[in-house]
Image (tube, grey):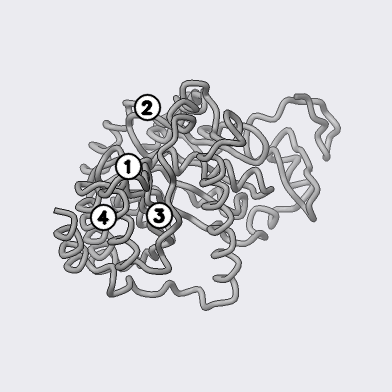
């Protein structure tokens, strides 16, 4: 859709996140960075509150990470928050699920690859405006080469993502990272960049084992890289209250994570179908049980953000009830 530049009045089609600025609840459009600086001043990029950065992670596959990341980001955008969804999985399922493919991907940003002769990739090159307040940085199989690039670095290879994303400071209120199901340098970068982690857990035994692995990784990041990541919540997925295993898994999680445990996301055919239609659950089946569950998740997440604004900025330590040792004990109850 054509928009008018607020500075030079030229008509253009917005393609990048920097071309849109929200001031006092009103949207302003700028065709170039020079126009944005003219209209808002150089300080406009840093005036807003620092984005809340949330990594969606479980080192076991098939726990609903991408579904949770997409619908959390879409739900935040639906409520008017400027939101960025970043795909850090080489499978590229975020772009596939939403029907979007960027000309350049997170691989180009991480490695500093050229997007034009003499021009290395910047966040503006890889951002894809999706719809509403939601922007996406996509991924594809080339990200596997990005892992190799990170492994070859001598210094600060865990903080490359943080450095590359610095140019986006002040543009978003939420950044949601969809992480791959592995213990990798990419996920270490995600956790060093994030403030908190949300852990989707399918209600089965092997997924509970995956929680233990995530807890260990979080503790290692805190101990070795001096970066504390708060546990935002644990989200039971594929929940079926009619089965004994589902009920026992949920009760076990509830006993250990207490207030950090979110209400379960019920097993839903509509949730499984939405990616094939290139839509979020809110677009594909807004009245379904899956949409209801994810709206509830988004509401709780926003409420927790509002509570945290009144508390000190330093994240609390990982709760003792979520320690790796106790999580290992937890899994034995489902065996």
What residue does disc 2 label? 140
Residue drawn at 67 percent across, 37 percent down: 132
Nearer to us of marks 1 and 2 is 1
Cα distance, mark 4 to mark 1?
11 Å
In this view, the residue in front, 242 or 130, is: 242
Residue drawn at 65 percent across, 41 percent down: 133
Q: Residues within 10 Å of mark 4 (few under 14, many from 20)?
A: many
Disc with the residue nearer the chain's start (4 vs 1) = 1
Cα distance, mark 1 to mark 2?
20 Å
What residue does disc 3 label? 198
Disc with the residue nearer the chain's start (2 vs 3) = 2
Q: Is residue 146 left or right of residue 279?
A: left
Residue drawn at 24 percent across, 44 percent down: 60
Classify mark 4: helix, strand or loop: helix
Query: Would you say residue 160 is visible in this rendering?
Result: no
Cα distance, mark 2 to mark 3?
23 Å
């Amino acid at each position: 859709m054509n928009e008018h530049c607020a500075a030079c009045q030229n008509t253009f089609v917005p393609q990048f996140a920097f071309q849109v600025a929200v001031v006092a609840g009103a949207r302003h459009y700028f065709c170039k960075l020079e126009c944005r600086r003219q209209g808002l001043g150089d300080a406009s990029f840093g005036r807003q509150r620092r984005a809340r950065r949330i990594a969606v992670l479980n080192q076991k596959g098939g726990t609903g990470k991408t579904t949770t990341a997409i619908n959390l980001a879409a739900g935040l955008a639906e409520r008017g928050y400027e939101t960025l969804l970043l795909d850090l999985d080489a499978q590229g399922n975020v772009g596939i699920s939403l029907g979007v493919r960027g000309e350049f991907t997170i691989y180009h940003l991480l490695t500093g690859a050229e997007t034009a002769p003499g021009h290395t990739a910047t966040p503006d090159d890889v951002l894809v405006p999706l719809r509403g307040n939601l922007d996406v940085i996509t991924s594809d199989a080339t990200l596997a080469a990005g892992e190799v690039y990170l492994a070859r670095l001598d210094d600060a290879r865990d903080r490359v993502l943080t450095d590359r994303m610095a140019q986006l400071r002040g543009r978003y209120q939420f950044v949601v990272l969809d992480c791959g199901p592995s213990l990798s340098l990419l996920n270490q970068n995600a956790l060093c960049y994030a403030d908190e982690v949300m852990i989707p857990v399918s209600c089965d035994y092997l997924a509970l084992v995956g929680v233990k692995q995530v807890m260990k990784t979080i503790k290692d990041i805190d101990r070795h890289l001096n970066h504390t990541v708060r546990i935002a919540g644990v989200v039971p997925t594929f929940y079926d209250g009619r089965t004994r295993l589902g009920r026992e898994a949920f009760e076990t999680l509830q006993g250990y994570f207490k207030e950090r445990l979110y209400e379960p996301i019920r097993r839903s055919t509509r949730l499984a179908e939405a990616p094939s239609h290139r839509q979020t659950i809110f677009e594909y089946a807004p009245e379904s049980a899956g949409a209801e569950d994810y709206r509830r998740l988004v509401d709780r997440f926003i409420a927790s953000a509002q509570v945290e604004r009144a508390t000190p900025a330093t994240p609390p330590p990982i709760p003792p009830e979520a320690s790796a040792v106790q999580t290992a004990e937890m899994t034995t109850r489902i065996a």
